[in-house]
Image (cartoon, rainbow, N blue to C red):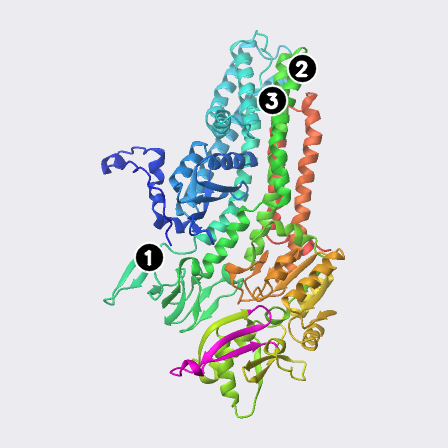
Amino acid sequence: MQAAFVPLPPLPALSPASVQAGFAPPADARWQALDDPAEWPAFGQLAQGEAASGEWTSQVMVQGMHCAACAFTVEAALRKVSGVIDVQVNAASQRAQVVWSAAATRPSRWFEASAAAGYPLLPSGSQFASAQRSRDLRMALWRWLVSGLCMMQVMMYAYPAYIARPGDMTADAAQLLRWASWVLTLPVVLFSCGPFFRSAWRDLRMGRVGMDLPVAFGVLVTFAVSSAATFDASGALGREVYFDSLTMFVFFLLTGRWFEARLRDRTAGALEALMNRLPDSIDRLAADGSWARVAVRRLAVGDVVCVRPGEAFPADGTVIDGATSADEALLTGESRPVEHPCGDRVLAGSHNLSAVVQVRVESVGEGTRFAQIVRLMESAALRKPRLALLADRVARPFLAAVLASAALSALFWWHTDPGKALMVAVAVLIVTCPCALSLATPAAMLASAGALARGGVLTSNLQALEALATVDTVVFDKTGTLTGDIPRLERVYCRPGLRPGDALEMAAALAAQSLHPVALALTNAWQAQFRASPGWHVAQVSETAGLGLEGLMRRPNAGVQAARRVRLGASTFCNVAPLAVDAAQVHVSDEDGWVASFLLAEELRPDAIAAVAALRAQGLEVRLLSGDRDGAAKDVAARAGIDFAQGDCTPEKKLDVLWRLQAEGRRIAMVGDGLNDGPSLARANASFAFGRSVPLSRARADFVVLGDRLATIPEAIAQARGTLRVVRQNLGWAACYNALCVPLAVVGWLPAWLAGLGMAMSSLVVVLNAARLARGTIHRNAGH
């Protein structure tokens, strides 16, 4: 559905000659194409329930950000645009989410506002984003190399002044070395320091204080003082030459930022790599039987496409010609290639590995599992954990305190030694820059979320990592979670005069309206036996979560009078007596009473026992809550090694149990199938939606398990514990670093170059410590 919008004045068009001549278009013209409503779904979606007002939620990448202050600036600039409703910016992931009204603005307006603030935007998933980041990294490498080369030469020229005794070097020789150092420092100041100066000037124009302002001010003061000493060796500042300290400071700072950028690129690039798994174009079968290359976004349901080895499947669909294997690691958590014979379903974003196949498209765009996974990962990359929000709030006033401390330090030393006063102020400015503080939490959280995603667990809420690290009780649902995705039909009981096959046909027709594992078991049993659609027409279907289905059923070509209301579900829902067995069972009833009962065999997942044992080894209590009969629930629990089990639980009763456990002071992690456990998943401190039948777009869980490995649950909890430990280490390091170095800088014992080294190393230590989480190795040592 397209939203209506207020007509805007036309944007200026460019002639081909102007484009060929390299003419730079006006700012708004650069994003003219984004004002086409057909482009909006490529980087956003119409807000649910807001179609009438035309509110869109768009995901964009922000260029030029490296700290919390940058995120504040982008948020402030975008919120000033009329029609922008809400903005969330995450500096660590360099992404932003913009909620805007199509009735009041267009993307080009808020793209222009962000660019005017010094932070250009790129649509999420843009192929240009990766190329631009590569160019930025190459330029950062060149700046670092220039600073390193010049630093080595300047240190060589400065060394004689440190070791020479009186009379060893003439005044002309000393002055020549100063001039050589000045010349070699110019490329460092004019080229290598370019990003610092641009960022600082941008902050000053916008009337704000950013983290590059102290750095730029320190570099300029140091260069000015040293230049004054070089030009006038006999003046008041004649002894204050710090070219070696300046170049060393810039080199160390760029070294830290280079490694930091590389590590952050690895984290930020993980989401982009996932989003860019879809091909730009694909071969589609035309009406005349020929193949034509078309853009993937032009595909529609029912199209037939040809996918070659090495290409990614462009949409969800069914293989209609050929057979192949596919890499689905990022979509299902399955690390091994998955075989797909003819007739099998393939997923958008998975890679074709072995053979050319033809696929009939069944889902495109937002309807694919791939798109739902991307949305979850985007949501996680944008949400800020509680500790990150606290650090962001502290960072801005801390910058103001930095400037005040530098000014007071300069005043304190001015009467004793003006030259030293300036250098002390520079050292204070540099050493107290809170980059490490602002990176401590988001770097660790994003790295951990990336590691979990590679293991088949999507994090939809970064805040939940903090909660998951503190849980002491894990509560499992049974059907489709602790047991296999789909039970097996074992036996059918039906009322006299009704054949078991007819009873199964009736149950399968109604069960086809649900995704519950029990419903899928009935439909699969019918298809396996008869390989045809049930001969019933079902209407007015309603599903009661955790209990069953109800609908109006009739045979085709029968009159309306022949329709009857049928229920499928638990014995209480169908108003029938349960069978006197402990096995899982489901019943069918109509207006005349009991129709049939079905016994289901449920098998534990292969790694269920090991997963429960791993959870208990971590010091966690494990419980089972099930809507099935109490005897069946306790039998499955006993086989899995769970001591506490409770059956006959409606969704309301599960909520009540969780409430009572939390009232006792327990912190709960709930693991359910995401179908009828929504209230319980929302109530728990942390929650997992488990099983292949999980509808990702409706999952209320903090974590979504893509594969069928229960082992991912203890692994995720251990990873969360390791993440919280790393966050605390990072925050502790940042606090200790400032507590130790600030007094040293104030009393003049910390030179500018060493302050620069300390600032660069503090940020680098934080990012390197967080990078351990990205490898997914922390959890192996993250015991209770």
Q: Is residue 30 left or right of residue 530?
A: left
Kindly tell me whether residue 751 is visible in this rendering.
Answer: yes
The residue that disc 2 covers is: 413
Viewer-side residue, 732 vs 378: 378
Q: CA distance from mark 2 to mark 3?
A: 12 Å
Mark 2 or mark 3, earlier in chain: 2
What amino acid is labelled 3 in the image? Val
Element at label 2: helix
Q: Residue furthest front?
A: 561
Whether 200 is among the magenta residues is no
The residue that disc 1 covers is: 298
Viewer-side residue, 499 vs 15: 499
How many residues crowd mark 2 within 10 Å: few (<14), some (14–19), many (20+)?
Answer: many
Foreground disc of the pair 1, 3 = 1
What amino acid is labelled 1 in the image? Arg
Query: Residue shown at 33%/57% (left/top)?
Result: 298
Residue 658 found in image quarter: bottom right
How many residues crowd mark 1 within 10 Å: few (<14), some (14–19), many (20+)?
Answer: few
Whether 548 is among the magenta residues is yes
Q: Which mark is residue 426?
A: 3
Q: Residue furthest top?
A: 234
| 577 shown above or below 772 | below
Disc tally is: 3
Viewer-side residue, 113 vs 374: 113
In this picture, which residue range is highlighted in magenta? 544-570
